[in-house]
Amino acid sequence: MKTVIKKSSFVAILMIALMLTGCVYWLRAFQVYQQMNDFDKHFAIVVTDEFTLQFKEPILYSKDFVSLSKLYPTDDSPTPDGRKWRYWFRKIDKDGNLIKPEIHFYTDLYFNKESKLTAWAFSSLFLQIAPPKFLEVSLRSIGGAEIDKEKHQLKANSALLEKISADLPKKATIVAKLGEPLEIKDEPEQEIYVYHFLLDTHEIEKGYEDRALNEVKLSFDKKTQELTRMAGRFAGLKVSINYKKFLVEQSESD
């Protein structure tokens, strides 16, 4: 057996979007981007039933996220160290009505007493479509990524990507958790399942109401029934991960 490593790319809109928001936000976002070059020095990852990215040297402020997304969290509650913002995303049907029984996931932002981001957590349901191993390697790949300002993208340098050995989630497992999709797009080699989730928020800046609607597209390989790509918009931030590109693939050889 020999190991064959294929080229890979990761597209993360968070940092580039913050960079293009304004001069002050750009400076702080670029500083976080630079921290990604020495990931373990500046960040830590904790996986329980949640996935949490911890910021060892906080830079971004809570106002940066509102300025970027134009959306406010579902809940804003005090903690011993500062505040916690929770964003609830609830599944809706084609008419915009909440699905019953309810299917939802959340993401939490933790801020210290200076309003700087110290941790970002994702709930267990979100990890069904972004498994922890793939989410971690995706975040690590931001370090050294190429900035494309025209397309608002960060593209990882394939020569620097870490490869992992992991099982891709199966369609049946994901559908059992998320329920039936709003739409299924049939393509020659894959099916794309489309889901809509509505952000439960108490305030949206005027003119940005459409950002509360979050579309998630899951691509499944027809032959293997495995999830190969996730693309979505969450609270105005776009994320796309091609999971198959991060795998160390095995091929037979004498």
Image: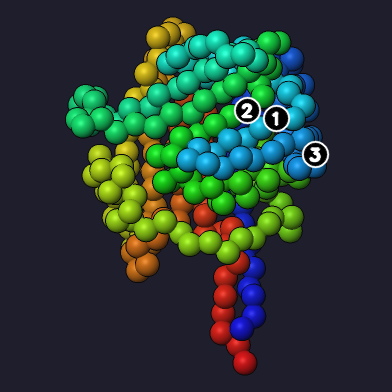
Q: How is the image coloured?
A: rainbow
Residue position marked by numbered label 2 in the rendering: 119
Q: Between residue 221 and residue 81, name the one nearer to us.
A: 81
| First reached walking from the N terminus: tag 3 or tag 1 | 3
Give the residue displayed 65% in from the left and 15% down from the top: 81
Label 2 secondary element: strand
Which amino acid, mark 2?
Answer: Ala
Residue position marked by numbered label 1 in the rendering: 55
167 left or right, relative to 182: right
Q: Between residue 142 and residue 78, name the one nearer to us.
A: 78
Residue position marked by numbered label 3 in the rendering: 41
Q: Residue furthest front?
A: 80
103 left or right, relative to 117: left
Residue 66 is marked as none
Q: Residues within 10 Å of mark 1 (few under 14, many from 20)?
A: many
Where's the C terminus, which quadrant?
bottom right
Residue 56's spot in the image, x, y percent?
A: 74, 30
214 left or right, relative to 167: left
Where's the N terminus, which quadrant?
bottom right
Give the residue displayed 48% in from the left and 28% down from the top: 107
Q: Residues within 10 Å of mark 3 (few under 14, many from 20)?
A: few
Query: Where is 37 relative to 238, above or below?
Result: below
Label 1 secondary element: strand
> Residue 13, can we see it?
no
